[in-house]
Every structure is written in C-alpha cells, then in structure tokens.
Image: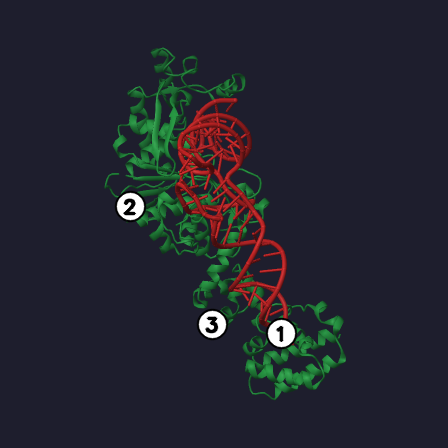
Amino acid sequence: MSDKRVRVRFAPSPTGGLHLGGVRTALFNYLFAKKNNGDFVLRIEDTDQTRYVAGAEQYIMDCLNWCGIAPDESPVNPGQYAPYRQSERKSIYREYAERLVMQGHAYYAFDTAEELDKNRKEIPNFQYGQVYRDGLRNSLSLPQHEIDQLLDNHTPHVIRIKIPADQTVSFTDMIRGRVSFETNQLDDKVLLKADGMPTYHLAVVVDDYLMKISHAFRGEEWLPSAPVHLLLWDYLGWKADMPQWAHLPLILKPDGHGKLSKRDGARLGFPVYAMDWENTQTGTLEPGFEGVGFLPEAFINVLATLGWNDSSGHEVFSLSELVEKFSIERISKAGAKFDFEKAKWFNAEWIKRSSAEKLKNQVEKVLIDNGVIVKDDNYLLTVIELIKDRCTLLTDFYLQAGYFFQIPAAYDLNAVKPKWTDEKTAFFKSVFELLKSTPSIVAADLEASFKALAEEKGLKTGDVMLPLRIMLVGGKFGPHVFDIAALLGKDETINRIEQALAAFVS
RNA sequence: GGCCCGUUCGUCUAGGGGUUAGGACGUUAGAUUUUCAUUCUAGAAACAGGGGUUCGAUUCCCCUACGGGCUACCA
C-alpha cells in the first residue's frame, strides 16, 4: 500500500430511508478513516433521477449525525473536491466517457429499451456484449456515415464500455482475498445514459479518482461489477491510484433468506431504518431504531458486531473503542442474519451503563411525547437512576417512570379485587392516618411501621404489599415499593392511597 | 440458466492440524428480589456431506450439497 492519505467515502443514493446495511457500510468507512487519521466523505449518488426522493439526502445526514459518525466532507460541508452530489457533477462524466470512446474502449449504442427488452425475452442468456453487439445498433456495427448522421440528429444514445475478450480480471479484496473474473462472462455495461447522466459504474470510478479515495468499502452485492470498474480504472489510465477494495458481507433477513431490504420493515416486526422515515409516496411513517427507543451508542455497537469482532470476547464497545480496535482483517466473509433480540440486549446494556445525567434528555423526550409533565430535573435524575436497569428500550421509560409523575390512569384490579377484604380497607385507612402524622417519608422507616401495622391488624405483610404497589404504581412492576413512596413524597402517597382505595372497594 | 461469493450451537461469533470446540444473544432449570426487571449459578445446543494430504483434520486441497449476490439506460 502506498503511504497516501486515507480517504474513504460513503456513497448512498437518496432513494428513501437509510437502512441497516447502509449505516453499517457508513460505520465501517468511518471507523477505518478515523483509525487511520483519514477523511470520511459523504457523496450523494443521485444519478437516477427517476428514483430520487426529496428529503432523503437530509435524512441520511440526520442519521449519520445521530449515530455520531458525521462526515468530514459532504454536500453541505464541502471540502476541496466539491461538488459532492453526482447530479451536480453531471458535466464531468461525459468527457471521460468520450475519452473511452476515442480510445476504443467504449462505443455509442442507439438501441432502444424496447429493442433490448425484446432481445432479452427472445434470446436465452442475451447479453449486450461481444457475442451480440455486432448485430445491434452501435458505433461498432454501423457504418461511419450512419453513426455521424445519428449523432448529428441527436438520436438518443448511450455509451457502453467495450469489454475485451478472453481476459482474466483479478484483484485482491481486503476482505475476500484474490477474486477473479473472466471478461467473456461480462456484458458491455452502460457508462453514460441517454439523459447524459453517468451510471454508477462510470461515476464511481471517476469520482473515486477525482476525490482521491484510497479505500473503497461497499456491500458484497457489488462484487460482480467490480471487474468492470477495474477495467475502467485501467482504461482511464489511473490504475496506480485505484483504491483498495473491501466488499462487506451482507446483512440478511433473520427469517427465511435473502438480504435485508427496506421493504422488510413492517413484516419483520422491527425497524430496518436508523431513524423514522416518513415515506411521502405512501404517506406512512416507517419506524427507525431511534424512534423505537435505541441509543445511538447501542445501534452502532450492534452494527459493528455484525460481521466484525475483535476476538477478545468483548462485545460492548463505544464508538471511540471501535475506532481504536477496528481492523479489516477481522471482518468476516459470510453474511450475517440480523437478530433483533440481540440488538435489544445491546441497548439494555447501554442504558445500564449510561449515567442518569446522560440519559436525561432522551428519557425526558420519551416522557413528554407520552404527555408526562416533568418539572424537576433532579427528581427526574433520581427516577432514572432507580429504574434504568429495568429498561430495554428508551420507550420503556414511560411505563417504568410514568407513575412517578402522574397518578396511575388505571389499576390492575384483577391483582387485588378478588382477594380484597374489609380488613384490608381498615388497614389502609390506618396507613393513611399513619402517614398523615409523619413529617416526611423515609423508606426504611415506612417499611418498618407498615409491617408492624400489618401485624397489629392480623394481616400478613405479603397480602398488603402488592395492594400498596398497585395503589402507587398501578401494576405489578417497579422498584422497591417503599422507595417509590419515599420518592413520591408524603402528600402524593396519601393521595394515591385514598384514590386507589375508592377504586378498590367500589 | 450463467458467473461470483460464502458455509462452526436456533442467531452473532472465537478458534485452528492433536482443544472437554470457547464466548454472547435467545432458551431451560435454580438462587436472590414479599411485584416486575436486574443480578448470580447451572444445563441443553455446532465444525454441511464425500474424497484426498497427513501419524492425526473441524482446521489445508478437491468435489458435491446448500445458502447468498449479480445477471437494467437502479444503485
């Protein structure tokens, strides 16, 4: 490897939400760049105008920011290789395509989409390549005067690469090792479309060259077209500057088979997007990991461990630890099925390891979104500290913390009513009196006097603990009940016992 | 169909010519918690198959099977 500066790019198409696989590609790019003190570039590959989705580019940026892997150079924060949107680079590509035509490595093709469709339908294994190109309408098969006429008339045409016969194209992938292809199997890919836009094949080569990309990470689905890119690097005379390739293993669906795709979101019962994505075409909001309550630290941790490990047996890593430990050698070759259960475990771990202070803003948002009014920051911090070990997703904080801020909307009456007795009513009335005469609640003291009172009334502690919990919390969950009472304070505890009692005996 | 890539517990994976094949998630059982969760302990659970090479192969090679990807004027 040369000692040139490490520059990598994440090059998504703005066609919709950013899914798991895309974020992981971005993450690996980021980790590799930061590990090597290099640059992480975001390039928007919007050459397909028919698939362009407004808002998708901003959304991609938002996702990267949320994940904490913001690019060093991007359309909105350009470096010296601007512009960073391929649509804005349109004029650049034709020159290179024409150069390839001049050199005999590419040619004009005038066939219409309909003609080609017909061929594909009628001829088994039809490829626009060395076998059939002489019989098609292009600058290799047509007489020169006809070509000139076609061009003069601005007849719609594309430029195709002329794949050479009988060659073996091979390269060393950083993940897969030596990979080889026979050119006889390749077809003459379109480089420049009729609308003047480049296809991915031309654009990726030209831009990686012009942007001085040193290492190119992309999904394994690109492996079959790698030889076309290799040929292009060679024909354009840039071979010495070609980035080192790394084709990442795919993220697969957990059920059945196939790679995880955007369409799988609803069906699988877990998000496939990083953040909620509002699909303006269907008018639906498709859930993202952020929206369902993931911490960004957990999300990137999950992604990093899909297809990579540091061999230590440790799995929970912060972003800076990932940067420190990341190495391409430890990326696995095989695709990985995504496991949402394990993803949730990572999130629970990150919630447990995070301080209440750190979680505060995110928890507060969850509470506010659910209509809970939070007045006192210190109170909120105490609550978070008390319950964070029992939350898997940030959204769990509403269930686990809501009752600290508002009286239960409903009680789990099935848990108390069937076994309710007049003795219990009497008991809680005396608890009520007891509290009234107490200056303020101390958890241990309340527990002691509560138990003593139960004994005095001839009740088993166990029979009145659960009712007390239901009174304060509404259900059979939550931390130590006397801690809850202490946090709620004397007045609120009295208030809740009173209200619940009315509901229990009605 | 053709080409390319891959294959260790259900899942993510460690390991690597001689190991009781390790860990994590999930799961099962138990302990703790007068709730639930956490935590702790223990258990079940894997080298796709066949040929080589070798004293010895899960590990190296080949074949098969299976899985995946690509096969657009989409990326």
Within-10-Å neighbours for mark 2: few <14, some 14–19, many 20+: some
Residue B24 in the image: x percent, y percent?
Answer: 49, 55
Residue tagged 3: A377
- Badges 2 and 3, same chain: yes
From the image, state whether disc 2 or disc 1 is nearer to you.
1
Q: Amino acid at mark 3?
A: Asp
Give the mark nearest the N terminus, 2 or 3. 2
Position of residue A470 relative to residue A180, above or below, is below
Residue A308 in the image: x percent, y percent?
Answer: 42, 46
Q: Amino acid at mark 1?
A: Leu
From the image, state whether disc 1 or disc 3 is nearer to you.
1
Shade of chain B as shown in the rendered figure: red
Q: Is residue A468 left or right of residue A28?
A: right
Gap between marks 1 and 3 measured at Cα:
21 Å
Q: Quadrant of the C terminus of chain A?
A: bottom right
Judged from the image, the secondary structure of the residue bearing numbered disc 2 is loop
Within-10-Å neighbours for mark 3: few <14, some 14–19, many 20+: few
Residue B4 in the image: x percent, y percent?
Answer: 42, 29
Shade of chain A as shown in the rendered figure: green
Q: Is residue A2 left or right of residue B53?
A: left
Position of residue A398 relative to residue B9, above or below, is below
Q: Which mark is residue A398?
A: none
Residue tagged 2: A79
Residue tagged 1: A472
Gap between marks 2 and 3 measured at Cα:
41 Å
Within-10-Å neighbours for mark 1: few <14, some 14–19, many 20+: many
